[in-house]
Amino acid sequence: MENNPGVIYVRSVDSNNNPNGYVKAKYLTDASGNYVMNPVQEKFNIFVKDENGQYVSYLSESEQQGIAVPYIVPYYYDPTFTASQFSSYAQLPAALIELCLFYAYKQGGVYDRQRSYNEKVNSDFVPAFKAIASYDFGIACEAVNMMTTCMESAGTYNKINKFMPRQQNLLLHSGSGKSPSV
């Protein structure tokens, strides 16, 4: 990717899906510094700060041409942290691992990458982090050797989350009411 800044900003949205601020982000790289590409071609408004501290729109040549771009992640995101945290759970009973994953990744949970980022938990929803949320969940599931179980559980969670009204679905949410359902 050409002329890529180290720090980018993406928009967060409020519970009505209205832009609500800027969130510090970056493009995901592997241990060798190569970009980790998002296989889904998604376009988000990316911003950088100019010399006056103002947010200005930024699109690289690749993004302008509609070519796949790297995952956009919270600025302090580190996938090796997720892997090391969850690999320490691998020896626990399966039911306990599933419970840990559920509470970590549920909407508003500490590993909900769409709403918990840059040292904030259950903050505003960031659409640009949707892809990395699934990617990160996959890292955790692989670390505990439960990929199939995790994928089945995630599908069930999303179905319940989509069709059950929020007021009746308190088990699945942290209760803040700040973030839209996805």
Image (spheres, helix red, strand yellow):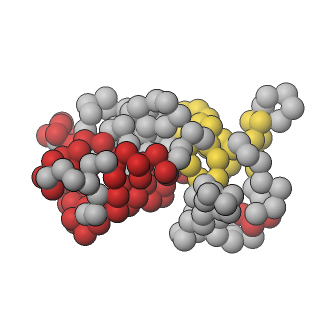
x, y (%) of residue 162? 26, 54
Asked whether 91 or 132 is in front, the reply is 91
Residue at x 75% of width, y 67% of height: 62
x, y (%) of residue 35? 66, 62
x, y (%) of residue 27? 64, 53
Which of the 4 image quarters holds residue 155? bottom left
Asked whether 144 or 21 is in front, the reply is 144
Which of the 4 image quarters holds residue 138? bottom left
x, y (%) of residue 137? 37, 55
Tell me: 77 left or right of 58: left
Tell me: 164 left or right of 36: left
Residue at x 53% of width, y 69% of height: 40
Q: Is residue 180 visible?
A: no
Q: In this figure, what is the number of numbered marks?
A: 0
Residue at x 53% of width, y 47% of height: 78
Residue at x 49% of width, y 37% of height: 117
Q: Is residue 82 placed above or below 153 in the rendered structure? A: above
Asked whether 68 or 165 is in front, the reply is 68
Q: Is residue 121 visible?
A: yes
**Quadrant showing the N terminus:** bottom right
Asked whether 169 or 92 is in front, the reply is 92
